[in-house]
Image (cartoon, helix red, strand yellow):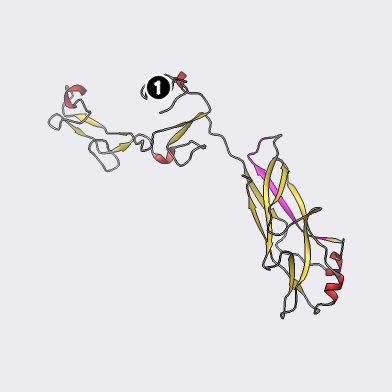
């Protein structure tokens, strides 16, 4: 087991507490699985060195193993259950954290409403209509630290632009622009939402604009819809 010692040749074995640095992760050798067993002597006058061998096994003529969780015999109980490993820096290998395990920040992300309706004319040209609100809460974050999340917006069309399709029939779609506040969203490209702070509700409006009035006039009348998919990831 590694310790706080600067000596690269330090051997595993008994170490005083000074070898371990508080609030630090420590790794254990792969396959680390220490075991123990409990045994008793058959006579109260028999000492440990008499009814056990040098390797720790029990001389059945003078002692016996104690059944633990329905099992008895040598090395039948784990000293450290692998489920108790607590090294957050390397969760896939044996390890533990000496001290208080640090809490990792997480993000609760939500949208104000599941769907929205609007008049196409409200989003003509430079006009923009708010259709939703994205919300992020930073959980277990450090005050004074800014966090970042990546948002990627797509829809069901194969075009490079976002498109509204007639809800009935097979008419041509209508192109539109998508904005997060005033930032134009490029379809399929990750948008960096930075400056996220813990302790507050971080919000940004989702808006639609850039619809061509001429294009709308050349389409069949009716209701047009689009389903926007949002993929949210942590930055590398």
Overall secondary structure of the magenta stretch? Answer: strand
Most distant residue in the left direction: 61
Give the percent coordinates (x, y) of residue 43: 16, 26
Which of these two is toward me, 81 or 214?
A: 214
Read off the magenta span.
129-142
Image: 94 above or below 187: above
Does the stretch in magenta take in 144?
no
Callout 1 environment at 10 Å: few (<14), some (14 to 19), or many (20+)?
few
Most distant residue in the front direction: 160
Q: Quadrant of the N terminus?
A: top left
Give the percent coordinates (x, y) of residue 219: 81, 77
Q: Quadrant of the C terminus?
A: top right
Image: 198 above or below 224: above
Q: Is residue 158 visible?
A: yes
Give the percent coordinates (x, y) of residue 23: 53, 28
- Count of marks, rendered view: 1
Give the percent coordinates (x, y) of residue 171: 74, 79
Q: Residue at x 69, y 58 (%)?
A: 153
* Residue carrying label 1: 9
Which of these two is toward me, 172 or 131?
A: 172
Q: Residue at x 69, y 35 (%)?
A: 143
Q: Residue at x 74, y 64 (%)?
A: 161
Image: 235 above or below 74: below
Does the stretch in magenta take in 141?
yes
Which of these two is toward me, 205 or 112?
A: 205
Q: Is residue 47 visible?
A: no
Q: Is residue 86 left or right of residue 104?
A: left
Q: Secondary structure at mark 1?
A: loop
Q: Which quarter of the figure has residue 64?
A: top left
Q: Residue at x 86, y 69 (%)?
A: 121
Q: Which quarter of the figure has residue 72?
A: top left
């Amino acid at each position: 087991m590694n310790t706080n010692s600067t000596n690269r040749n330090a051997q595993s074995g008994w170490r005083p507490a000074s070898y371990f640095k508080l609030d630090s992760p420590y790794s254990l050798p792969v396959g680390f699985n220490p075991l123990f067993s409990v045994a008793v002597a058959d006579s109260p006058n028999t000492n440990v060195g008499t009814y056990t061998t040098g390797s720790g096994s029990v001389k059945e003529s003078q002692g016996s193993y104690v059944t633990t969780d329905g099992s008895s015999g040598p090395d039948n109980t784990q000293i450290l259950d692998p489920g108790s490993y607590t090294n957050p820096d390397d969760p896939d290998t044996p390890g533990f954290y000496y001290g208080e395990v640090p809490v990792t920040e997480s993000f609760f992300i939500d949208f104000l409403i599941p769907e929205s309706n609007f008049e196409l004319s409200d989003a003509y040209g430079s006009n923009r209509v708010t259709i939703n609100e994205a919300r992020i809460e930073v959980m277990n974050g450090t005050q004074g630290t800014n966090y970042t999340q990546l948002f990627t917006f797509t829809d069901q069309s194969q075009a490079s632009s976002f498109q509204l399709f007639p809800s009935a029939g097979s008419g041509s779609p209508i192109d539109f622009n998508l904005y997060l506040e005033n930032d134009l969203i490029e379809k399929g490209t990750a948008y960096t939402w930075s400056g996220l702070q813990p302790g507050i509700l971080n919000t940004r409006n989702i808006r639609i604009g850039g619809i061509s009035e001429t294009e709308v006039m050349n389409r069949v009348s009716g209701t047009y819809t689009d389903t926007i998919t949002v993929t949210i990831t942590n930055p590398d």
